[in-house]
Image (cartoon, rainbow, N blue to C red):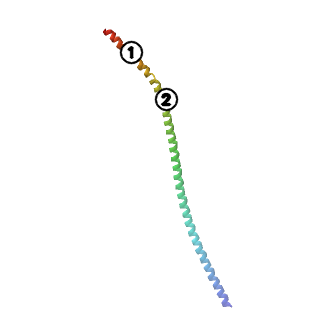
Amino acid sequence: MAEASESSRLSRSQSTAANIESLNEIETCAKNLDAEATLLLETLQSGLHRISSSTVNSVSQYSSLVSSTCDELDASIKSMYVMMARCEELVKVMSKVPKLQESLVAIKKMLAHFESSLSH
């Protein structure tokens, strides 16, 4: 019986040593997994930060371009209205040209008549 007890104690001692070794191995694997997961998360965080920064820059540039385009479009519309107003003024001024032409034709006829009367 002492032999059985000794065998049982030896078996428990070996079992405990195996359990401790297994626990140490599990702890080492857990630490490695933790380190790899931490590195992966840090890499992911860095990548997401770069993507977010790039997105913010893109949106900022897009907003600036839209604002600039709107300003240019507004200036073009204002210039178009100024041009239309000047064209209307030109049309008003040019509407006097036919009357001036008639006056010039009448003056030319009177000069021709005057010259013909002087030459006789």
Q: Where residue 14 sits: x, y (%)?
A: 62, 82
Q: Residue at x 51, y 47 (%)?
A: 62
Tally of numbered discs: 2
Residue at (58, 75) in percent of width and height: 25
Label 2 element class: helix
Q: Give x and y (percent) for residue 40.
A: 54, 63
Q: Residue furthest right?
A: 1
Query: Which image quadrant: the C terminus?
Result: top left
N-terminal-most mark, 1 or 2:
2
Which residue sits at x=52%, y=47%?
A: 60
Residue 85: assigned label: 2
Q: Is residue 26 above or below residue 37?
A: below
Q: CA distance from mark 1 to mark 2?
A: 34 Å
Q: Height in image: 17 above or below 90?
A: below
Secondary structure category for the residue under label 1: helix
Q: Which residue is mark 1?
A: 107
